[in-house]
Image (cartoon, grey):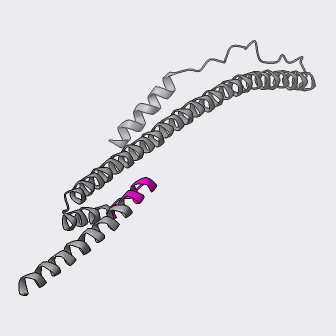
Amino acid sequence: MAILGAAALFLAGCSKREEPAAPSAQRPKASDSVSSVVPKAVVETKETIQDAAQKASAEAGILKTQAQVQVQQLKDQVVIEADKLKAQAREQVQSAKDQTAAGADKLKTQAQALIDQGSKLVADSKYAEAGDVLKQLANYKLSPEQQKTTDELGTQIKAGLAADATKSVGDLLKGTK
């Protein structure tokens, strides 16, 4: 089989005749000397390189300008996003302040309700119950006015309890005689 392949190649090669190549326009004539062809080739190569360098420089300039525009766009976008985040942070801080203030107002109102309840119990001479109500105020941060009222109520409760105790002892002593 290998012999058949080799024979086919040999026959194909023998039947084909190569004709001499046609003279080309680019081939130097015999009259041209090597010294005149080399300088032309150097000049052509130099011009090609210079053209390529100019094109590359122009392309680099375009790319540089495009990159600068993109960088500026990114900077602008970062500034915009930073401003948005600042605004959101301000809103959240203000919301937290408002909630804190609302919570403080609610606690102040609750404390005042307890003070009012304690005052009513003192007025009704229910000193022990009023004392229990005032104990609940220990968990609240009171305003100076509320603290003053609470202190006064505490004094009234102590005096009332002392008076009740004295009356009870007196009643007890009257009953034993």
Q: Is residue 1 left or right of residue 61?
A: left
> In the visual, does 22 lie left or right of 78?
right
Q: Is residue 137 above or below residue 174?
A: above
Residue 36 part of the magenta segment: no
**Residue at horizontal 24 percent and vertical 72 percent from the top:** 163
Q: Residue at x 16, y 81 (%)?
A: 169
- Seen at 6% across and 82% down, the residue is 175
Whether residue 144 appears in magenta in the rendering, the answer is yes
Residue range of the region highlighted in magenta in the rendering? 138-149
Residue at the bottom extreme of this rendering = 177
Closest to the observer: 34 or 121? 121
Report the front residue among 159 and 21.
Answer: 159
Find residue 34 and report its image quarter: top right
Q: Main secondary structure of the magenta part?
A: helix
Q: Residue furthest right?
A: 35
- Give the quadrant of the N terminus: top left
In-image side of 163 versus 175 (left or right) = right
The x, y position of residue 140, in whole percent, is 35, 59
- In the rendered view, would you say 139 is above or below 62? below
Count the numbered circles shown: 0
